[in-house]
Amino acid sequence: MTRSLSDDPPDDPAERTESDAVADPAAVTGGAAADDPGRIKVGVGELAVTTDDAVLTTSGLGSCVAVALVDERAGARGLLHAMLPAGEGRTTATSRPAKYVDTGVDSLIASLDDAGADPRRLKARVAGGAE
């Protein structure tokens, strides 16, 4: 199972896909920009969760922050590529939670929990955040 949340839906509603229209990461299925079925590319302002053998990747972090969480026992892994530190007071924090570290981590943990992970067993790795 793979779940992803893209926070950059097209401006034209006619061009939106089902995953663009859903802000709940637990309700979204499919890979984020995956050209290869064994690889899931997580873009800026996106998150993805998988319980299969797919490899979660991202690139171009710069000042963005990537947060990887894993529950090895459940076989669930997730990756967040957040652009900004905090969504507090921003109108997009609810509709685009993966854009921000604070709301994105909460969404990532919730998605992993939905995928069978135990939040108490999650191990984290963080990268990026250049000035």
Image: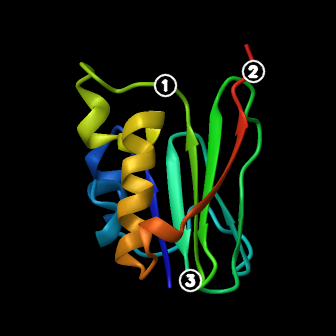
Residue, x 76% and y 36% (percent of image)?
60
Q: Give the camera-side residue of 21 and 119.
A: 119
Q: Which amino acid, by three-letter code, is at mark 2? A: Ala
Q: Which amino acid, by three-letter code, is at mark 1? A: Pro
Label 3: few (<14), some (14–19) or many (≥20) C-alpha neighbours in 10 Å: some
Residue, x 36% and y 42% (percent of image)?
97
Sequence-first tag of 1 and 2: 1
Q: Which amino acid, by three-letter code, is at mark 3? A: Thr
Residue at the spot of label 2: 130
Q: Give the camera-side residue of 102 and 31.
A: 102
Residue at the spot of label 1: 85
Q: Is residue 38 left or right of residue 2?
A: right
Sequence-first tag of 3 and 2: 3
- Helix, strand or loop at label 3? It is loop
Residue 51: assigned label: 3
Classify 50 as above or below 95. Answer: below
Q: Is residue 26 left or right of residue 49?
A: left
Does any portion of residue 7 appear in the rendered image? Answer: no
Labels 1 and 3 touching (C-beta < 8 A) = no
- Helix, strand or loop at label 1? It is loop
Q: Give the camera-side residue of 18 and 42.
A: 42
